[in-house]
Structure formats: C-alpha cells, structure tokens
Image (spheres, helix red, strand yellow):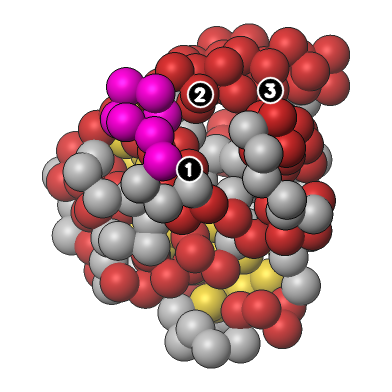
C-alpha cells in the first residue's frame, strides 16, 4: 500500500514534538549534557543522545539511580528546560514542509494531536511561537501521563482525546523509542529522519514510510 493510500484511510495524525515538528533534539541533548556533567556524570555527548527519551525524572533516574528525590529531579528538569528554551529560541522554526502539511491535513478533515514526552511549557513554547495551536484538538504532554514512551499511554490518550480508535491513527515520530510507543499502541508510523539512522528502526513492523521532512507528503 502506498503512503497516499495509507493517508486516505487515516482519521487522525498524532505528532511527536521534539525532532518531529521542530529540529531541536541537538539542543535538548546539549542542555542535558551540560546538566549531567555539572552533576558529576561522565556521559559523552553521543551517549547522552541515547538517553534523551521519556520524562525528565525517568532520564535522571536512569543515569543517577536513587540519587535524587522526585522534588530534586523536578527542579533539575525545570532548570534544563529553561536552558533549552533560551538556547533554541533564536533557531526556532518548523521542520520543512510541516506548516503546509498541517494546513492540507486540516482541509481533509483529518484530526490532529500532539503526543510528546515534552513538558507542556515546551509544547506551548513551540506551537504558540509558531502560531499553529489551532490545528490540534488534542495535546498530551509529560504532565499528562504516568508512564512515558515507549509505554503506549501517550498515544493512546491522544487518540482517546480525539475520539478515535488507535488503528485509525498514524503517528509521526523521529526516534526508535517513539516508534516503539506507537507500535505498542497499535498505530502505524511515519519516521522523520533527524538524529537517528534507518537501521535503528529495522526491528519495528509498524513503520510505513521514512522521510527527511514534510515537503513531499500530501493527502489525496
């Protein structure tokens, strides 16, 4: 089945945020790396890339097991997110072709939602600065789930908010953990290439397409 045929059967598109709507993962990785080194961690920048998934408290717990209280992890995560927004804002822009793709999707009456492990402040930072909030009828952030990606809760809640069955949704993702989350939720995925190579997605059977951006994605 072609990508266009897949789109024609979809009732909802669910978008991850970081690396999928904006190319900001290098800024998240760099901001976390600075914080982790400050805290005495010895991860390389390349190793940090592979830890950048899930909620902030989960990330800190993976790197520093049982070292910080939840209160401390929330404070450290908040500091990191503030650093990220300061450093990324001058470079903030949507991934090529996304704005036109959102407008085209809306014309075809396909519902849209955001399902991200980002905190709500970061989601608001992107969609309000880019003036695209009106396209989305559902937003699920790290603040809204108990278990983050690859647990399916994020995308299942997003589909539920849209009033859609999981099988009627196509997810747009850029990371293996995000694709795994979609697979666990019973959803097909379009992968946006960014920080990861195609080989990293080979174990997943829910990927229907790989693209570098949204420029050539259309709905017929």
Give the residue drawn at x 30%, y 30%.
70
Mark number for residue 198? none
Mark number for residue 84? 3
Q: Is mark 1 on a helix, strand or loop?
A: helix
Chain part drawn in magenta: 67-73
Question: Is label 2 in contact with label 1 (beta carbons under 8 Å)?
Answer: yes
Q: Position of residue 33 (x, y in %)?
A: 72, 39
Give the residue drawn at x 43%, y 71%.
180
* Viewer-closest of 195 and 4: 195
Quote the CA–CA distance across marks 2 and 1: 9 Å
Give the class, few, some or many, for how many residues have Cα within 10 Å of label 3's Cα (few <14, many ≥20): many
Q: Is mark 2 on a helix, strand or loop?
A: helix
Give the residue drawn at x 47%, y 87%.
205
* Viewer-closest of 124 and 72: 72
Q: What element carries label 3?
A: helix
Quote the CA–CA distance across marks 3 and 1: 16 Å
Residue designated by label 2: 76
Residue designated by label 1: 60
Compared with 137, 211 (above or below) is below
Compared with 178, 101 (above or below) is above
Q: Position of residue 9 (x, y in %)?
A: 37, 67
Q: Answer with left or right where residue 1 lies relative to residue 143.
A: right
* Viewer-closest of 176 and 209: 176
Q: Quadrant of the C terminus?
A: bottom right
């Amino acid at each position: 089945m072609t990508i266009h045929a897949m789109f024609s059967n979809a009732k909802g598109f669910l978008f991850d945020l970081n690396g999928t709507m904006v190319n900001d993962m290098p800024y998240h990785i760099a901001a976390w790396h600075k914080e982790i080194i400050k805290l005495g961690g010895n991860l390389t920048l390349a190793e940090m890339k592979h830890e950048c998934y899930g909620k902030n408290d989960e990330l800190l717990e993976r790197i520093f097991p049982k070292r910080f209280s939840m209160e401390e992890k929330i404070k450290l995560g908040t500091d990191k997110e503030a650093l990220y927004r300061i450093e990324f804002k001058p470079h903030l822009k949507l991934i090529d072709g996304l704005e036109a793709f959102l407008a085209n999707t809306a014309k075809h009456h396909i519902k849209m939602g955001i399902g991200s492990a980002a905190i709500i402040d970061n989601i608001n930072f992107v969609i309000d600065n880019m003036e695209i909030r009106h396209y989305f009828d559902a937003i699920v952030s790290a603040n809204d789930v108990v278990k983050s990606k690859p647990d399916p809760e994020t995308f299942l809640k997003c589909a539920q908010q849209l009033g859609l069955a999981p099988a009627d949704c196509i997810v747009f993702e850029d990371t293996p953990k995000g694709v795994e989350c979609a697979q666990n939720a019973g959803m097909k995925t379009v992968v946006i290439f960014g920080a990861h190579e195609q080989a990293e997605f080979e174990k997943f059977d829910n990927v229907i397409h790989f693209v570098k951006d949204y420029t050539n994605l259309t709905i017929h």
